[in-house]
Image: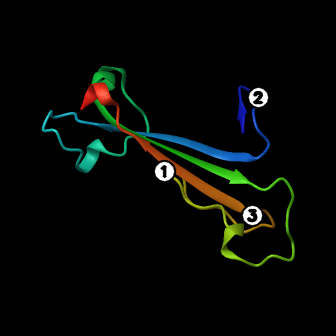
Amino acid sequence: MTRNGMLISAEIEDLQVEFGVDANDDAALTGAEFPIHVLPGNLVNQVRAIRISVIARAPQGEPSYQGPDRLRPATANRVSGAVDTFLRRRFVTSVLPRNML
């Protein structure tokens, strides 16, 4: 994972942040309200949920392993990637801001 051309982590392949925004103030996240991948500035005060997804990749490939973990899983708004020799794990957590409920 890189940011502005600088390596942050060699084993983190993808990091996604998704927002749930109650745009119509009906106290429910439905339809186009979740997930939102780009948060417009005018909706910041209406965030009701945040989901963070991380894909970690093994530092070295395992050419002899033939399991399903070799496929880069789909996460958030990115499709799955090609099969290679690296094992991967996907970690997902959701946050419900207390002050916004």
**Is 63 drawn above or below residue 1 in the view shown?**
below
Residue 68, located in which quarter of the rendered image?
A: bottom right
Residue drawn at x 21%, y 33% is 23
Q: CA distance from mark 3 to mark 2?
A: 25 Å
Q: CA distance from mark 3 to mark 1?
A: 19 Å
Residue nearest the viewer, comparing 24 with 12 = 12
Q: Residue type at mark 1?
A: Ala
Q: Residue type at mark 3?
A: Leu
Tally the marks.
3
**Residues under numbered marks 2 and 1 in contact, where contact means CB atoms less than 8 Å apart:** no
- The residue pinned by badge 2 equals 5
Residue drawn at x 33%, y 23% is 44
Residue drawn at x 12%, y 38% is 26
Q: Position of residue 17 (x, y in %)?
A: 49, 39
In primary-sequence order, the first of circles 3 and 1 is: 1
The disc label shown at residue 87, or none: 3
Secondary element under disc 2, as helix, strand or loop, is loop
**Is 98 drawn above or below residue 70 in the view shown?**
above
Secondary element under disc 3, as helix, strand or loop, is loop
- The residue pinned by badge 1 equals 76
Q: Residue type at mark 2?
A: Gly
